[in-house]
Image (cartoon, grey):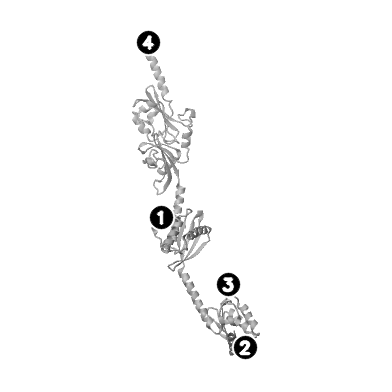
Amino acid sequence: MADWFVLAAISVVSASFAILWLWPRRQKRIGDYGLSTPGSLFDVVFLFDGDRLISHSDIALAGYETVCNWSDLRRLLQRDYPSFPETPEVVRSEGNLAVSAIDCTVEREVLCEWIDGVIRVHLRDLTGMPPAKRTDPNDPIRLAMEQAPYPVWLSGDCNTVRWCNAAYVSLARKISGQDADLTEPVFPLQLDDAQLGRKTRVSVQMKDSEARLWFDLTRVAHDQGQLCYAVDINAIVEAETAQRKFVQTMTKTFAQLSIGLAIFDRNSQLALFNPALIDLTSLPPDFLSLRPSLSSFFDRLRDQHMMPEPKNYRGWRRQMNDLLEAAQDGNYQETWSLPSGSVYSVSGRPHPDGAVAFLFEDITAEITLTRRFRAEMDLMQSILDKLADAIAVFSDDGTLATTNYAYQMMWGDSREVGFEPATVVEITRQWQEQCTATPILGEIREFVTARENRAEWSGELILKSGGSITCTVNPMQNGATIVRFSLSNAVKNSTEMQKISA
């Protein structure tokens, strides 16, 4: 009997020492006992016998009065410690288990220990604790994940977040506010296994705002769910949006042009065209929308008879290659006379990054007008050449504009006028060489260059070869001047005799 009392006393003393070791010493109470608040009291111990709570430190009563069993404690810890074991059996099978907070910036953990059939749950603060006493001291992989500049998180079953790094916490609070539930995923769960390991572009909307944030999201399979990475691409999306708006603006601008525009990218594929190109080339829109290559584009133009028919295909193909090279150098310019009678001006212009732009302009009206003008000028010249009197026309700037055949026979001037036209001073000097001195030539010079007091007048020139010429000066409304020379009868007869003898 005495041995039995001694054994009982030893057991009581041992149990007392064990209980004293199981929970920490009392600490001074403070007002806030939340799990994540910076000022909370977070050093408490719970003892479980299976699922049933059998004891706890006195400090636990201040914040966890409702805890009666394992499920109650897990319900309180679920939001900040989603990896807390669902049942005590997990702790018994693994021995010691440290559960980190979902927010890696919070230096607190829940340490679960199996001690002779009793489970000790210790909610402890790691701040100031030496690395050697921490459960996971300075794990380089975990450290790299926690300090990564882009969001990283572990998504478990039921689309809940089990762990996240500081960048993810910052993003979640930026989107949902400071009281954001970190277990609720910021990004939608990707259920398609085929997308695992692939980069997908996703966006999330800010709380109480129309703004959206864009990310490249990559998910990889993990034994506890999916490990996810999000890279901020807002700058890229903004640049793409600005580029798209610019292209849309340019497209609207080009749509108003009457000049056909075809821009080929660095791969020689059609990147942009305007409606005028369809009207001018008669190429179907569906063909242009397929982004044909440069060679296919001009092949189709040739088939549509919208470019000059080449003499042979091989030479035409070589011409197309020369065309591309010339356009890249910025010096391609041609006028196409089409079988339909239309005339196009086609030019090639280089663009940055190897792109080439071709401009198609219908200049049929201009060419027709030019040809009509030339025909009228030829007709006018033919009429002047039939006149017996010599005619010289001076423009308003005092240069010789045109003469007729009789003038050439009288003064012997060339009819090639236009490149460097002679002035009235130079022409009158030529006349002076064949005439006796007279003030009439000086008066003609003054009249041609004058702007006021211009009225028709005439005078007589005496030729050194004999005979006289009647000179009549007529002003025109546009500032031009006509000088007409009429031969006397004696000179006419002499000229006729010279023609007959010739």
Image position, residue 120 (x, y; %) = 39, 26
- For label 1, the residue is 290
Please name the amino acid that badge 2 sits on. Answer: Gly
- For label 2, the residue is 467
Please name the amino acid that badge 1 sits on. Answer: Leu
Which of disc 3 and disc 4 is earlier in sequence?
Answer: 4
* Numbered disc 3: secondary structure: loop
Which disc, if any, is residue 419?
3
* Numbered disc 4: secondary structure: helix
Which of disc 2 and disc 4 is earlier in sequence?
Answer: 4
- For label 4, the residue is 3
The Cα–Cα distance between marks 4 and 3, rounded to whole angstroms, is 139 Å
Label 4 CA crowd tier, 10 Å (few <14, some 14–19, many 20+): few
The relative height of residue 475 versus residue 206 in the rendered view (above or below) is below
Q: Nearer the viewer, mark 3 or mark 2?
A: 2
Asked if labels 2 and 3 touch by Cβ distance under 8 angstroms, the answer is: no
Which of disc 1 and disc 3 is earlier in sequence?
Answer: 1
